[in-house]
Image (cartoon, rainbow, N blue to C red):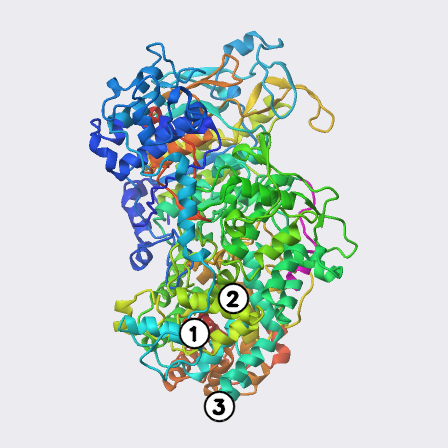
Amino acid sequence: MPIRNLRSRARFATQAIALMAIAWTFSPAVAFGGEAAPAAATTPEGIEYFERHVRPLFAQNCLKCHGEKQQGGLRLDSRSTALAGGDSGPAIAAGNPQASLLMQALHYKDEIKMPPEGKLASEAILAIETWIKMGAPWPVESASSAPAKAADAWKTHWALQPVTKPELPPVVRGAWPRSPLDFFVLNKLEARGLAPSEPAARRILIRRATFDLTGLPPEAPEIDAFVADQSPGAFDRVVERLLASPHYGERWGRHWLDVARYADTKGYLFTQDRNYPNAYRYRDWVVRALNEDLPYDQFLIQQIAADRLAPAADAPSLAAMGFLTVGRRFLGNPHDIIDDRLDVLTRGTMALTVTCARCHDHKYDPIPTKDYYSLYGVLASSVEPAQPADVMTLADAERPVVPHVFVRGNPGNPGESVPRQFLGVLAGANRQPFASGSGRLELARSIASRDNPLTARVIVNRAWLHYFENPLVRTPSDFGLRSEPPSHPELLDFLAASLVEHNWSLKDLHRLILKSATYQQASADRAECRKADPENRYLWRMNRKRLDFESLRDGLLAAAGQLDRSLGGPAIELTKSPWSRRRTLYGLIDRQNLPSLFRTFDFASPDTHSPGRFTTTVPQQALYMMNSPFLAEMVRSLANQQELSGAREPRERIDRVYRLGLGRPPATHEVDLGLAFLAEEDARDKRAPVTGSPQPAAQSAAQSAAPTLSAWERYVQVVLLSNEFMFID
Amino acid sequence: MHVDSFAREPLALSRRELLRRSGMGFGALALAHLLGGSPVSAGEVQNPLAPKVAHFPAKAKHVIHLFMNGGPSHVDTFDPKPELTRRHGQELPINLPTERKTGAALASPFQFAKYGQSGIEVSELFKHVAESIDDIAVIRSMHGDSPNHEPSLLLMNCGEARLIRPSMGSWLTYGLGSENQNLPGFIAMCPGGYPIQESQNWQSGFLPGAHQGTYIDTKFTDINRLIEHIDNPLVERDDQRRQLDLLGQLNQLHGQERGVDPRLESRIQSFELAYRMQMEAADAFDVSREPQHILDMYGPGTQARQILIARRLVERGVRFVQLWHGEGQPWDNHDDIEVNHRKLAGQCDQAIGALLKDLKARGMLDETLVIWGGEFGRTPTVELPKKGSNAGKINGRDHNHHGFTMWMAGGGVRGGTVHGATDEFGFQAVENRVHVHDLHATILHLLGFDHERFTYRYAGRDFRLTDVHGRVVKELIA
């Protein structure tokens, strides 16, 4: 099915009027072919009809008196009580509207006229009549016990169980595992009669690891050294070198910035300045924290409450709080700003969709609206002080806010007050209100706690996503009741437990994964395995990954010998000539008008928290590779590098361009194709035969003003356009 | 050589089919699949714009949305109010809160006349459009939620006034794909720059970025200024062809060593498509290829050019074309409404009228839904002067979301219809009120979608264009 056809029973109603409008939309005759049989009572369609058209009417018009209050002895919040009726007798005769007291009351026919405020719209009455005709279908659980049900389901929901470190499962191919995690992968493979793939070739492995850890291609000497190093532990040394590289923090920092919906602008504002000129200080903090391997729990606590830590944080540390503050400004609407921050906080760190509970209790997960406003109160009690060092920090307000539930999310309709406190489902029975200031530090510690069953699982799943493309839990930012269980639950727990055990060291997590046989597998197709597991859910091979936007652009700069490897600093414009040589991480991200180049290559939307990037294939990507001036400049730069210009023979130059562009020497056949292409193009190219002597690098500036690409340059461009350049095996 | 313009006419249909089919290879190749749910699993999303099937068969396949940004006055265009004229200068019994303070009744300075078999009254501002009134359903009872531009623009485009949600065009390319893979499926054109709220008006929200509207500044005529990277000044087209031939050979070698991988294959195809797109896009945006009588029919100027481009795009299978009148909010006439509305309507009336007739003559009106309107209408009362907000001229109208007019034509719409009514002055929709959500539900219905089932799972819930609202206005459907 191309279209998601999930019949949602979720009604995120905000207004009574909206619910009435829903009831109007359906002519029951159309929906049920005119003759609705009582048999519908047991069908999903019947339940659907009830949930969509009838329950909202009851909720809006009846339950105030005929719910827990039971006026006249009548409760309309469960099927049994509705059928049983009240003091006047049974309210509903299933299948027979004429005999149903409820219908008489709704029609205002006799002395009982309901609801007393005024007769319902005829469409609404018709909806209830149709529903009774159908046999009054009602889901098994009653309305009043639904939240309790959800809480029960949570009690056994995998994501809420404490993380325990599972034993290594048995495997047949005992020689294969190199890391404990391999046992979990191999066990599942063998259970399905699948075998893992051969180890990847060394050139492929170093390219894979270098892109994965730094977002950059390996340099030619690094490849040669690794290929030549036959001593034990050669790959481990590569991993250690990469983890120690400052580019590691740049790469994994960018992954985190997707989570944090990072941008350098505030979004739409009519007249005010839209820039966050200091957002980059948060970006640089993230890069540095990862490079220093700041334990992940501290990484989170500092981003949520650096201002509250003792000893008092200095300005660079306060920049951590950009995590909360770099969001969209929603034309200054404070409720939307807080909602966005709560979303990043809860989906980003715990994969809980707390903001679903802004207007009503969460439909699936045990997150009552009250809990939303408990957290809302924490952020509402946090203000943005002016900082001399221009970091976008938060501080506790002098007097913390006592939050009120906003009925149906409407700030103009405050309901009961709630304490500032953590989520009930995680805090358990002994939940205590936050006692210190806004409560933000207590909130941070509750999230970054080893007792929190979600936090560690969520981050190891995100890391897994970046290595394997298939996360263990398919919905990295929703571990709620409606999420699919993990493909490898024990592996997920093993990784989470190991992370905590290793003092939340993310670099240790990377070591665990990179040193595994699972990670080091080849990515080539194997038809028999593909048949059994087409999605490669069980990892019978490595998944081939496409370069994302950052790695593509950085990789082009690197191949061209143009990459500026300097770290940090204010954001720079990437999309205009003269082209910046800085890494893509440092490009200005304008949230309001994200340049089409970013969108074309599936960059994460900076508007809201991003669980993962899409991978689309559209012709605009190809147009960019074929025609953009940036590409032409990279092509010219690579084609005219000193190393290439020193090589006089075309054969030798082809060899060099393969090594610089693709990290390997060309096969004989590839050389032949190249020579044939160059011969033909040179013959056609009347303006500038290139076979004899390429332009020395010193002249490349002058050459870039040349009207057309030379035959040699056109050849080099083809190498950069190749699938091999764009994909990581 | 002289090209006989008549000779081209009988070819229009087959040519159109040809234009569309040129892009279909990609769709056939792409895995028919799965944009919903988790966006993250290997080998998943291929071409997000491959053609797809809606919930049920529908007439409308394309949309042209003529966005009169700023808010055109309904009482001066499609909603005549004789009572307003009678009470000109008097205080009205109704004066609802809008963005700014308004005063006494301001009669429309424009003459209305009856048109067509249906005899629907239209003002002189849109006399060309009025010639097609029997193909038009006029909704005189539109209403929204806010008297301000920003939330009203987002509501009209994305069904939500503040939060990040996909726009209608991105929903439709998500649901239907596009019929021409050589052109973007959703194109937003605005001459001179962005409307206010900018690219958020055609955002893809949480849908994949490929569904975002591609913005085109129709101030330009040079194809290189219209579509990024559509041409390469450094490589001749023939040379590029041979580059791609070599690329194909290298990629084939690469693929042979690695076995089946649809992603490798679809990237190979994308280069071929891009190569063809260079020709196709240049052709689609070049209105000079139209015969003179068509150019004359649409008339001169930027509006005419972009409206004619819109026809050429839907003819080629583009799913959703949104045309904005101009940068900022041109129809926002707080002052001098007579002069300004006359000027603005003068820029687009002839071309919109021509579009309707042209589509009909080509047999395309049935499958092309044309939508006309702004983000709201304007007050029947005169805007009072206020320092810093208007020029103090007392001859303009304020924003009005309580009641306004939009119209739709083609695409299965019941022509020659007036639906709903505002009060006797045009302040508020009172009869058969149609909320913006209802309009969206109806538009989705015309394109084959049940708006309640047309959902996308994101952040733990199923989102809809109509959120929890909307009802299909059956009376608007033929």
Chain letter for mark 2: B
Chain letter for mark 3: A
Asked whether residue A524 is drawn in magenta, I would say no
Res. A689 in view? yes
Real-space Cα separation, disc 3 to disc 2, in angstroms: 50 Å
State the residue position of label 3. A232
Real-space Cα separation, disc 3 to disc 1, in angstroms: 21 Å
Q: Provide residue B335's location: percent of width, then percent of height.
A: 64, 24
- Please say if B101 is above or below B167: above
In the picture, measured across the screen, residue B99 lies left or right of residue A512, that is right
Three-letter code, disc 3: Pro
- Please say if A278 is above or below A718: above
Chain letter for mark 1: A
Three-letter code, disc 2: Leu
Q: Do labels 3 and 1 share a chain?
A: yes
In the picture, measured across the screen, residue A278 lies left or right of residue A18, that is right
What's the magenta region? A271-284
Task: Kindly indicate whether the residue at mark 2 contacts the one at mark 3 (C-beta within 8 angstroms).
Answer: no
State the residue position of label 2. B234
Mark 3 vs mark 2: give the one in front: 3
Asked whether residue A272 is drawn in magenta, I would say yes
Residue A234 - label: none
Helix, strand or loop at label 1? It is helix
Helix, strand or loop at label 3? It is loop
Q: Provide residue A292's location: percent of width, then percent of height.
A: 64, 71
Q: Nearer the viewer, residue A191 or A53?
A: A191
Three-letter code, disc 1: Leu
Mark 1 vs mark 2: give the one in front: 1
State the residue position of label 1. A181
